[in-house]
Amino acid sequence: MHHTYILECADKTLYIGSTNDLAKRLHQHNNAKAGAKYTRGRRPVTLAYSEKHRTLAKARAREAELKRLTREEKLQLIHR
């Protein structure tokens, strides 16, 4: 199973990504050098939203869709 996710950073910005191990990736974003450069300077990050997908290709396609949304649209998705 693969996941597309939205993180809320400490500075209230949003980060979107995809992974096959959501718990591990969240740990990396908060603790490891393996976390995205964007989130390293904005810790701690919290998981705000996630979706499951059968394939990495579908998760990555959804990631691209989410990145095209406005901030307001992303917040609406998170808070539904």
Image: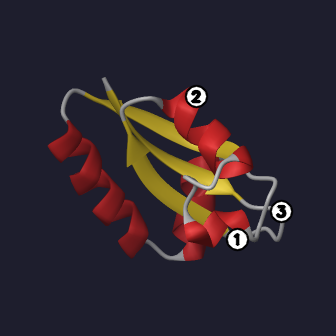
Neighbours of disc 3 within 10 Å: few (<14), some (14-19), many (20+): some
Q: Residue at x 73, y 46 (%)?
A: 31
Label 3 – label 1 distance at C-alpha:
7 Å
Relative placement, left or right, of 10 versus 74 is right
Disc 3 versus disc 2: distance between alpha carbons?
Answer: 18 Å
Q: Is residue 45 above or below residue 54?
A: below
> Where does the N terminus fall, quadrant-wise?
top left
Distance between the alpha carbons at the discs numbered 2 and 1: 20 Å
Which amino acid is tagged 3?
Answer: Ala
Tell me: residue 80, above or below residue 20: below
Q: Of discs 2 and 1, which sits in the foreground? A: 2
Query: Hey, which quadrant is residue 76 in on the image?
Result: bottom right
In the rendered structure, find residue 10 and report the number of the disc placed on it.
Answer: 3
- Residue 10 image-quadrant placement: bottom right
Say which residue label 1 marks: 13
- Residue at mark 2: 23
- Circle 3: element type: loop
Q: Of residues 7 and 44, which is closer to you in this image?
A: 44
Q: Nearer the viewer, residue 8 or 41?
A: 41
Circle 1: residue type: Thr
Compared across the picture, whether 55 is left or right of 44 comes to left
Residue 80 shows up from this direction: no
Q: Residue 1 has which mark?
A: none
At 61% across and 71% down in the image, what residue appears? Answer: 38
Q: Is residue 18 above or below residue 13?
A: above
Residue found 77% across the figure and 67% down from its top: 42
Can you say which quadrant of the picture contains the C terminus? top right
